[in-house]
Image: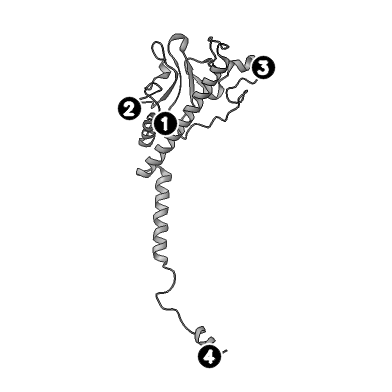
Amino acid sequence: MSEITLKYATKRLPSDAGIAIGPILFVVAILGLLAVIMASGIGDYGTASVADRVKADIVSQGNLIRTKINECNIIYLSSGTNGDGYPANVNLSTGDDVSTLTCEGDVAAGLNGNLWSGARATQLPPPTHGFQDWYYVNDAAAGGGRCIWTQPLNGANSGITAGLTSAATKFSSQEYIYNPAGATQRFVIWITLPSGTADSLCQSL
């Protein structure tokens, strides 16, 4: 071995050289703590993430469902049971699950009449986490209007209330009903406004 090779082979690194493992472990611990807080929905981080998700889902899903219902009416006009193209309401006491709605004009044409898998198939997204399915009410014949609505499955928390309150800002005052102090936290979107007293299912109680 040459003198130069031996010189570099035997040279030791200074005592402060190497990876600073302490600060790295500290950062990893902090990130882990934040992940636990956000996953459990505790604290401001959890509230903000729930509110953002609820707002985004309610606005996008509500607008999509309303568009599909209005599309059925526009295309089929007076072909429905009620003298228009809006889907009929089978169960006025509870409303109809939106996933089961039938576009009656499609049925008359011999097609699959389901609003989502019929002539103009569209993917119906699942309800946002913690919420029940969307429901549809067609009480226009009695003056109660037409609406869609959803509400939390197990009551509200600060994140849900914040999300619904924020979602309401994306609709005009004539398009929605939401009472942040209501027991059910029901969020209602109008398809057509009532000509008389609003149907009880189209109210945020």
Type of amino acid under label 4: Glu
Type of amino acid under label 1: Asn
- Marks 2 and 4: which is nearer the front? 4
Q: Is residue 18 above or below residue 204?
A: below
Name the foreground residue: 120 vs 37: 120
Residue ranking furthest to the left: 181
The residue that appears at 45% across and 9% down in the rendered structure is 142
For marks 1 and 2 on the same chain, the one whose residue lies earlier in the sequence: 1
For marks 2 and 3 on the same chain, the one whose residue lies earlier in the sequence: 3
State the mark number for residue 3: 4
Residue ranking furthest to the front: 74
Give how far apart the Cα atoms at labels 2 and 3 are.
Answer: 46 Å
The residue that appears at 54% across and 17% down in the rendered structure is 74
Give how far apart the Cα atoms at labels 3 and 4 are.
Answer: 94 Å
Q: Circle 4: is it few (<14), some (14-19), or many (20+) Cα within 10 Å?
A: few
Labels 2 and 3 touching (C-beta < 8 A): no
- Marks 1 and 4: which is nearer the front? 4
Secondary structure beneath label 2: loop
The residue that appears at 46% across and 12% down in the rendered structure is 140
Secondary structure beneath label 1: loop
Type of amino acid under label 2: Ala
Give how far apart the Cα atoms at labels 2 and 4 are.
Answer: 85 Å
The residue carrying mark 2 is: 181
Type of amino acid under label 3: Gly
Q: Is residue 102 above or below residue 156?
A: above
Secondary structure beneath label 4: helix
